[in-house]
Amino acid sequence: MIRLNEHYLKLNSSYLFSEIAKRVNAFQKQNPSKEIIRLGIGDVTNALPKACIEAFHKAVDDMANDATFKGYGPEQGYEFLREKIARFDFQARNADIEADEIFVSDGAKCDTGNFQELFSNDLSIAVPDPVYPVYVDTNVMAGRTGSFENGRYSGLYYLECTEDNDFIPSLPSQKVDLIYLCFPNNPTGAVATRSQLKQWVDYARKEKALILFDAAYEAFIYDLSLPHSIYEIEGARECAVEFRSYSKTAGFTGTRCAYTVVPKSCMIYDSQGNQHSLHSLWNRRHCTKFNGVSYPVQRAAEAIYSEEGASQVREIIDQYMTNASMIRKTMTEKGYSCTGGENSPYIWINGKIDSWMFFDKLLSEAGVVCTPGAGFGRCGEGYIRISAFNKKENVEKALVRIGEALTA
Ligand SMILES: *Cc1c(COP(=O)(O)O)cnc(C)c1O
């Protein structure tokens, strides 16, 4: 008899996006002529930068000739891409990372979800609340938690992110072995400073813990004093893995390319206390279960490091960030306290009422879709997330309607 991994039965059926869709469809049915504007999505709306498209096309042509055709590439990614990543994303910021510490992949969702395979099942794990659900659900599937009750899994340590700590979690009061952090944060938009990150790095080194650092939104950081990479913090090479993605940076959500950094100085311990190289283990896992990102996609990703590519990426991000600042301005003027939207594409708004009530109000009175904060964890209750990923005209129109709805 084929039997089930019963840990899957513990999963809180993620009703967030299906519930949003259900309410939006019901509203549209009752108001067929009303144009709905979606500011709930975590997906980009602008086309790929021109430089990426040109490189992509050229690489497709390479596949058409025996002389330039590529079959299986290196599982870890082509040298041409890994070298540019190391140079432009890390060494240029004084972060000591080499090309052979980069693992190119088809997404940061898979990487943040898969990485836990390397760990023992009796770890104590710290996750933020509110949280990007992938970190939690993949540990549930692996059997590292108890059941889901009152909005939380037993056996996880929740790092509460609230207005009191400016949505930057403080160190845990009990010992933890594995720590998930995400800055700039989805959903709160908060970004940790150097000294805040330093506290986590110092903690991890002292406890021989590991930080899994999701930097999928680093390209949205404008404040020059904020770190883009955890490796800008002294000591992080010994205790942190970093996840990056071209999805939000350069519009690759439908094209798929990302990478994970595993420094060679990161160690992991067996039950006897002997140390092993985390890099070797991840390399073993990656080569066994993954066969590389397609050659044309890696050429397209490489193009963002060219001069034109970089300036086209900047232009697209500037457009989204203009939206973000308009959203923040309107909501602040209406008397709501906001985080994010200055160094991240998400604005996290204290709605002062139940998240779903605020969601329904914006939908029914303004025809605007946001994301209820309660869907990201218990600490998200009372908040909504508005995304800056849309066309400027749509955001402007949405903000006029929101302004009217919140005045009435
Ligand atoms: C969008 C997003 C990612 C990127 O996922 P991809 O699989 O690379 O598209 C990673 N982490 C967070 C928090 C995100 O919001």
Image (cartoon, rainbow, N blue to C red):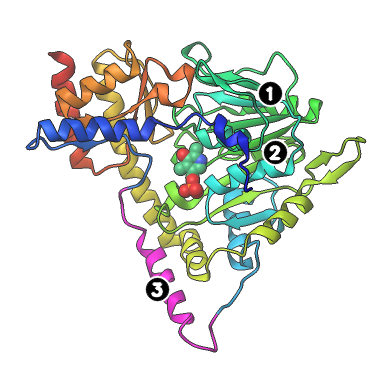
Magenta segment includes 65:
yes
Q: Quadrant of residue 358?
A: top left
Identified at 61% across, 34% down, the residue is: 7
Judge from the rendering whether residue 261 lies leftward or rightward of residue 382; answer left or right.
right
Quadrant containing the C terminus is top left
Q: Nearer the viewer, mark 3 or mark 1?
A: 3
Query: If you read the primary sequence from the N terminus, does the residue marked by circle 2 or circle 1 appear first?
Result: 1
Q: Quadrant of residue 309?
A: bottom left
Judge from the rendering whether residue 387 lies leftward or rightward of residue 396; answer left or right.
right
Label 3 secondary element:
helix
Identified at 50% across, 68% down, the residue is: 299
Ligand 1 lies under 8 Å from the Cβ of mark 1? no
Q: Amino acid at mark 3?
A: His
Query: If you read the primary sequence from the N terminus, does the residue marked by circle 2 or circle 3 appear first?
Result: 3
Magenta segment includes 391:
no
User: Can see residue 347?
Assistant: yes
Image coords of residue 167 (percent x, y): 50, 20
Q: Give the vertical position of 16 relative to 157 (above or below).
A: below
Q: Kindly give the residue lying farthest to the front in the view shown.
A: 1
Quickly name the residue at label 2. Answer: 240
Quickly name the residue at label 3. Answer: 57
Mark 1 Cα shell of 10 Å, populated few (<14), some (14-19), many (≥20) = few
Mark 3 Cα shell of 10 Å, populated few (<14), some (14-19), many (≥20) = some
Image coords of residue 293 (percent x, y): 55, 63
Mark 2 Cα shell of 10 Å, populated few (<14), some (14-19), many (≥20) = many
Q: Amino acid at mark 2?
A: Ala
User: Can see residue 341?
Assistant: no
Q: Kindly give the residue lying farthest to the left in the view shown.
A: 33
Quickly name the residue at label 1. Answer: 199
Q: Amino acid at mark 1?
A: Gln
The segment highlighted magenta reads 45-69
